[in-house]
Image (cartoon, coloured by chain):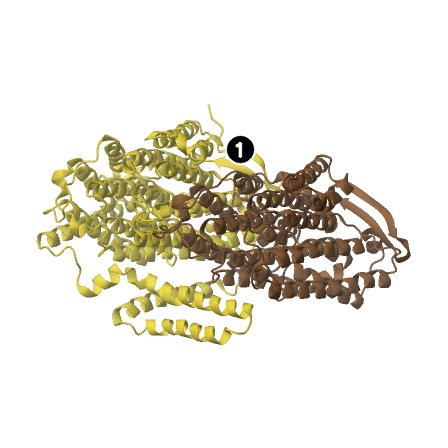
Chain colours: A brown, B yellow
Amino acid sequence: MIHFFIFIPMIASLLLLATPVRWREEVAGFAAALTLGLGLLMWRGGGADLVSVPWIQALGVTYSVALDGVSLLLALVTALMTFVAIIYTARRIPNPGTMLSLILAMETGLLGIYAARDFVLFYVFFEDALIPALLMLAVYGKTHRMAALIKFGAYTLLGSMLMLVSIIGVKALGGSPTFALADLIAHPVTGAAQMWLYLGFLAAMAVKLPLFPLHAWLPDFHEQNHDSGVADVMGTLYKVGAYGLFRFGMTLFPDASLELRPVLMSLAAFTAIYAAWIAFRQTDWKRLLAYAGLSHMGLVGLGIFSLEPTAMIGAIYLLAFQNVYTGALFLAAGMLQERVGSLNTKVGGLMTQAPILSGVTMSLWFASIAVPGLAGFIGEFSILLGAYQIYPWLAFIAGLSTIAAAVYALSAYQTTYWQARPPGGVKVFDLQHTEWLVLGVPLAVCVVFGVYSAPALNLIQPVVRALLGGGQ
Amino acid sequence: MTMPLYLLPLFPLIGFMLLICFGRFFRGAAGGILGSVMVGLSFIVALVNVLNLPAPIHEVLWTWLPNMAKNAAGGTVNLPVGFYLDRLSALMALIITGVGTLIHVYSISYMHGDARFGRFFAFLNFFVAMMLILVMADSYPLMFVGWEGVGTASYLLIGFWFAGHRDGSNPEGVSNSNAARKAFIMNRVGDLGFMLGMFLIYKAYGTLVIPDLAAMGGALAQAQRSIIELICLFLLVGAVGKSGQLPLTTWLPDAMAGPTPVSALIHAATMVTAGVYLIARTHFLYDLAPVASQWVAWVGGLTALYGAISALNQYDIKKILAYSTVSQLGYMFMAVGLHAYTAGVFHLLTHAFFKALLFLAAGAVIHALHDEQDVRKMGGLRKSMPFTHIVSGVGVLAISGIPIWAGFFSKDSILTAAYEQNSALYLIGLAVALLTAFYMGRWYFLVWRGQYRGHAKAHEGGAVLNLPLGVLAALATLGGFLNIPSFLGGHHALDSWLGNVLPVLAGELSVGTEWGLTFVAVLAGVLGLGLAYVMYTRNQLTDAPAALRDVSSNSLYLDALYSNAVSIPAAGIAGVLDSMDRGVDSTIESVGETVGSLGRLATFWQSGFVRSYAVSMLLGTTLILGYWALKLMGGLA
């Protein structure tokens, strides 16, 4: 089942090219729904155990996939948000065949990243997801997309190259027979070499986390992507750096992780407050969301790097659910743009004419700035609490971002949604048709998992416990 | 018979859900009635439980946060969501649902005809639910849910007229929205303190469940003294933010931008007292932290003075009451800081009655005068609104500490505690009592006596408006008898009822001294009111002498200080960071901008004698206090 789960989107993506235009939305929607359904079935069945077969024997590459709790949760969120993105694409983008195809292709890459238990396979999926992301920007982007594209491509590819070197190095220096994760763990690299290999891997993951100072591609990437926000949802899902570090970094480079902990936690805490502070100055909703997401990722990084159980659980929790609300907020920005023709935060007065859209957007923002009772809080609070146990000052600095978050989110929200509609502005319509689903489902997820976290915690906790060696 | 505790927040939550999701089905006053009924049901549940409360009820529902609690064996387990009702939280629940129901009923009339009538009640219901979660939470994180939840509700309700009162006037909309945002952000500053407090509690004791911590008793003292002090100071930051104490006080007067029932419920009776509740709830730590407790008391004392001075020369009928709330909350902080927890909670109770009463009376006036809020354009309303006049008089007598009204008893118990422990705070408290009586006298005479100075045709508000006023007036009159001190022949009924939850200070004063203290306190109240009357007869009541007037009506320039010293530089720095992040092109330009905004900070000190003098005084006091506290605590690890 796990193989279908991973590859159905890719197959559907290729199938779309041969599908008559009028059925494309349906086929894409069906494929995404099927993937999500399979994921839920696997959740009921308790995940998927390791399947490992040789792939390129000469090089020791295997096809090893598994979905344990953490991977399953992130894969489910990916499948859910892809489904939501496809529904919105079908509504918003005229003749959306190419976009749908790219989204589905990217989904396979993302699901593969979470399922891969072979270092080379991980790399393959990692790059597989990159190509659709680049194409989306190239095909659907805005005026300055080429600059953004080059920035994005350059950062990612440079990181990937270093990662590839360190992947090869891990096997060569450790003496493992294959690239399968289990084999690599059994043949660890020690000493100074581990540190250098970790730094190589870290480069790629820090770009994709993203972590200051390797984040510069992110704001341009989001600002230049299509107005609908669909590509941004996929881009948000593609921020897999924290997962990569959790799955491969902490297990293959334990000593180096511990040694670099103060540096990395400082960088992450700085990223959190730095991005939040900049977000305050943004006048473009998508750029603002990019910085807001960056700030959250700083917190995720703080939790992952801390190696503290509560903080790591919180980091995975936040990583999973920030995809939901940040993604939904990008789509809400798309809806805003569709109505008033601008993404500028100074164009105001939506609340009086579109109260439901404005109210749902506000609730999603509350989830994003970690108002307790919504999903964002559990992650943020656990991260900060855990980080405080290690370095109180860093938790304090990162904690300042919760204040800054209120400042940037509410300031921009106020000028766009509150306050009177300017005289002569176009009449704004409220949520219509599938838009209810597109924003309603993510909001419901945020509420449910903010109040009743046990299903997600049950997925995360055993994995984190196992990773940190049983004891709490 | 007891009823499940989760019903308490559940009813208003259901009301909120129904009104938000199916608002269109509730036409006319139906939404308001639904909202009121839901809170009324909660009140019944609270009452039933309070009447059958031999021992605290602890209800555990489902798991929520990872690794933040301990099981019986001392192992780490996930933190559950649970509710805890003891006498302290029961009293709070009664206040919230009781006063809440009255204010809901009042709002049916007050908000009649508003375009978002149903949504108003949805938000009010949401607020009540969150406030109940706050007081009944069995763990600090769950309390934090309510804590930020009420902040969110307050944000929504302050900004309820986000586009101006009838969606018409954008300047008013902007200022309402700004007030809402300011409240949320300043609360967030406090919330960070609360969070840090929780982190440190977890570090020191490994659990965040309040009854578990309280049950540790003497074992709590095993943590380092400085850690306990620091926990208490962190929590104080949280309490200060939520309760509008110095230095995070400026949002509370601005919060008056919300509809008047909101000011009565949230910004007078319930939410802003959450800080007092937090400290009383955490008394087991504050008892071990003398320095932090001193801080609480001083923050309270100074804020009481600050609020009273600021209230002296306001013109907005609600702003006078808002600064008065700040000041009265200062009293409560002073009490809990002096470990007179029951006195603080007692004042919280009576204040909820008389301040809600005063706000609702002010609302009736505003309603009658078609949204006029300036006291200079009022006067002589006792003829056209006799009932509201009488209940307002009751409120003024109660807050001024005139026997037999409720404020007399509660203020007296706080002043007694201050007299026993700290004479400086006692003198401040006494001065504040005098000032309180004066500015409330000013409020009364300007609104109700003399000749009408406006143009509207005032009229009484009608039964739905008057019923809650009458009930609150009765409570403000009789509430004090719940806790009659022994020298007046009573038995400290409320103190001893709360005694099994909160430590009660043993009274060591002789009966003669107590009589003396009471006499002095009442004298202060009478003097204040008398002074107001004398100035009223001489027509000098509207404005104080110029120097005092400027200081007071600008509330000691605290807002200007924050704007120049924090907001503008922060925005400037954000600009620099932004251009740096985009690339170097525009960096140099924005560096200039930042230097400019920092320059504003410097010019601020030279912009006028009085304002910089007032601010310097304030800052100086803070610095001295800070130095003193750090010195006492020694180096913090």
Left or right? Give the position of A21 relative to B372. Answer: right
Left or right? Give the position of A187 relative to B518. Answer: right
User: How many labels were placed on the picture?
Assistant: 1
Q: Is residue B225 visible?
A: no
Q: Determine the residue positioned at 77% across, 38% down.
A: A1
| Residue sitting nearer the eye, B82 or B252 | B252
Q: Residue furthest top?
A: B1
Q: Quadrant of the C terminus of chain B?
A: bottom right
Q: Which residue is mark 1?
A: B59
x then y, percent, for residue A296: 57, 55
x then y, percent, for residue B524: 20, 51
| Residue sitting nearer the eye, A105 or A272 | A105
Q: Quadrant of residue B501?
A: top left
**Residue type at numbered disc 1:** Glu
Q: Quadrant of residue B341?
A: top left
In the rendered structure, the residue with mark 1 lies on which chain? B
Tell me if mark 1 has few (under 14), some (14-19) or many (20+) residues whose alpha carbon lies within 10 angstroms of its own: some
x then y, percent, for residue B202: 57, 50
Left or right? Give the position of B262 relative to A401. Answer: left
x then y, percent, for residue B493: 34, 35
Label 1: which secondary element: strand
Left or right? Give the position of B147 relative to B369. Answer: right
Q: Is residue B182 visible?
A: yes
